Image (spheres, rainbow, N blue to C red):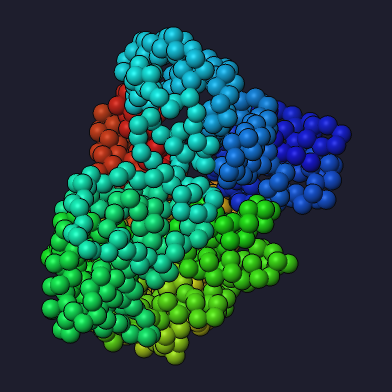
Amino acid sequence: MEFRLLGTVSVETLTGPLPLGPAKRRSLLAALLLSANTPVSLGRLTECLWDDEPPSQARGVIQGHVSRLRALLAGADAEAYGVELATLGDAYVLRAPETLLDSQRFEELLMLAREQRGPMDAVLMFKEALSLWQGPALSGAFAGPPLRVAAHSLEESRLATVEELSRAYGALGEHHRAAALLTAETVAHPLRESLAAELMLALFRAGRQSEALDRFHRTRRLLADELGIDPGHDLADAYALILRGAPGTTGAAPPKSAESSPAAAPPGAEGPSRVAGGGPDATAPAPPRPPFPAAPPSPAGEPPPVDLLPRAPRGFHGRAAELAALSRSAAGEAPVCLVTGPAGVGKTALALQWAHRNPALFPDGRLFADLRGFSAAGEPALIDVLREFLLTLGVSPRRVPESVPAAAALFRSLTARRRLLVVLDNARDSATVRTLLPGGADCVTLVTSRHRLEGLIASDAARPVPLDTLETDDGTALLAGVLGEERVLAEPVAARRLSELCGGLPLALRVTAARLAGRPRWTLAALAGELADERGRLAYLDVDDTGVAAALRLTVQHLPPGAVHQLARLGHHPGGHYDPYAAAALAGTDPVTARAALEQLAAAHLVTETAPGRWVLHDLVRLYARSLDPASAREALIGVLDHCIATALAAADTAEPGGEPCFVLPEDFRRPSAVQDFADRAEAMRWLATEREDLALTALAARKAGLDDRAWRIILLQWPQMVWRVRDSWSPLLELALEAARAEKDAYAESRVLTLLGWVLTEEGRTAEAAALLERSPVLAREAGDPLGEATALVNLAVVQAELGELPTALENCARAVELTRGEDDRHTEMLTLQHLARMHLTAHRPQEALDCARTALDLGPEHEEAARRSLLLAVCGEAQLALGDEEDGVRLLDRAAQEAERDGYDEGAVRALEALLRVSGRPEFRRRHDEALRRLAEEG
């Protein structure tokens, strides 16, 4: 069985294609296959099957197509292939092995092609990938907007592959083949400049210069006539290269990947190169030679060039950009180049790789010293380092001064007229480096450190070259360099998984490769499975005295106690990001102290500042930090949970200042030393949106730790964001809150969570599920003595009842909710109940009652009342006025409702008001704003 998207949407079996039937059924299948093994909501499927307003029976149509597809698959023995079309609530999922999808096989072949070292192998792989295409993607289906986007994306991937294949042909010198391939595609895509540029270069290299120039002028005219634009960089650079008749353009290096191959960049542009082979010259093109002046002749009697460098690193991979950055930094007068990064990231390997690749730049020699700034053995005495340097430079042992200042002065004097490279590895502080700096303007000093050494930057204009972890492709290349390419190519997915589990850290990757090299019968997948278990990952990444934990331990032992304490507590945070408030809550300190500790950890490259005031830990550092103080795990967790509750309360109060409190705080609540202030609603909502993932992880950790009283509160406090982005997949999180509330046997909590969950399910179109939940909510609220909670529950229940056709009952429940809120003198909740009562009067064709309710609600709230509520109330007023025959006032109010929603980013409210406007007015402005609001909603997910 095979599923095809690269051409006509079809299901191929041993007996031929399945009779899928109408185009919409193929659309449904395509939508499910594009998200294979992932649930696709009914709403998403509706968008794929209809361009405009779907019919009222859309759900039934989709269910019918699903039923027929399920029967067709069952008849073709799909179960034997591991294929299943399942229903998950209001969503469907097509479970199938990825090998059965032509689009997935296409991507797998592309990945393998880009990893080939030889261009001939790359050509075979690219051709195999393109052979899977049987025509335009998703043919035969009715392409709703999401499917059109998907088809365009697949076609872009195909065209990029054609361009890569042409470059591979070029690397073999088969430029005629490249030109023939590109000519056909250029005819079909005449405005694609990258295709035209590749074709021009292929024609030129094939000796057809006049055709290449003609192609440029034809494309230039077409761009001007069709789009009114001039040629872009790709075309212009290709044209300039052809006019120059530049030498060396009749061949190209074999492509490694579209983004890293030299041929992928415009001619003359520098780009990173990633070659899978080992050795000093296999990782990147040679960096440009710094413009050093000619070296002066050595004084008579001085020794020949010296070399203290350790051997070049073996199996070095990637780092083309950093090598080039070092070459740029080494230019100038007495440059100091500073390579910084966390333990195990490959700083020494980078420094040695660069040093060994540039021997001609340093005719007087290369010196090296391991300053052991982070070693358990301690740092060497500075006089010992200077003595070794001086003896190497030919100084008699008796002439070496005994004091550090005198020895440093002699070293500077001897190097004043030389061109030397001095590599100072593993420096811990700036003062040590300053003592060892040579004196010559033509000398280059290359320093590596786990610290940022900002003092050296300030005093000696050191030029930093920060080193980050390896990309996944470079990580797998490093594994291949140790294990052999055959072993890695046999398990490409497992190799990528190992690279990810090692966090791109070269030290971790080398330890992993060492384990596998000594065990030829182990599979990469088996070791990946072992590493996936966080509890043992650091142990697996230690070999003898070399490993991640050992490297981190040496870094940590030089930190002040406060920073170590902070690091240990950070390891117990269930989320991925930290600000000073969260760090303080974890450590039991205050934000000022926490920020200082975070800065110290950042200087040691143990945490990374991803945005101002926001830090992350590398996964392996997090595991190590967790091991520093395991006994404090629960205390740290409670601290961060209560921080989340306090901050989310502040955000909710700022975002919805009139709202009633959701709950009282837990009895043993530990108030943080400081809580973040929010300047306005926008800042509060931004915090809730930014922290959503971490809040979810924190709530899940609370549930697992039995701290259910915290779990449901953290989730419930995100209600302003849930109201704002109601169709943003909140139900799984709320179901977790419901489990926590029920585990606590807390009627108040259960009622509040049920009310919110029921409303979210209603907005997702899961009306029957919502009704079943909401029936229980008002009863629980009464049991808990929560009249405002009962009122909100009655409103949400009424909304469901109205959708189910029980309008009289819905009106009664809304009226009862209004009474409850007035009894509690809560204007904010009363506005909410009146808003829904007004909407139901409108549904019941009672426009005057709807208008009266909406106006009463608007009179209750101040101008800064929640934007969503004001917009919805104004929309009800506008629709009521239209129903009463006052079109002018109705249009004015609906426009105002849309404007308020647009101003505050409430796109769902804007769409609702503008849809009502478009039913009575055809003004282009309303259509434009409606489409823009829809686009923003789509972009936000």
Question: Going 38% across and 29% down the picture, which residue do you hit?
Answer: 267
Instruction: Tell me which corner region of the image, top left, top right, bottom left or bottom right, holds residue 28.
Output: top right
- 669 with respect to 64 (left or right): left
Question: Going 58% across and 24% down the picture, which residue do you hit?
Answer: 174
Q: Position of residue 316 (x, y in %)?
A: 48, 57
Instruction: Tell me which corner region of the image, top left, top right, bottom left or bottom right, holds residue 743.
Output: bottom right
Question: Going 39% across and 45% down the picture, which residue do you hit?
Answer: 286
Q: Position of residue 593 (x, y in %)?
A: 22, 80
Instruction: Tell me which corner region of the image, top left, top right, bottom left or bottom right, holds residue 19.
Output: top right
Question: Going 35% across and 35% down the picture, which residue do you hit?
Answer: 269
Q: Nearer the viewer, residue 125 or 246?
A: 246
Q: Nearer the viewer, residue 587 or 353?
A: 353
Q: Nearer the viewer, residue 368 or 171?
A: 368
| Farthest-out residue, right | 15
User: Is residue 435 something one can see in this rendering?
Assistant: yes
Q: Position of residue 868 (x, y in %)?
A: 31, 50
- 711 with respect to 108 (left or right): left
Image quarter of the N terminus: top right
Q: Position of residue 659 (x, y in %)?
A: 29, 65
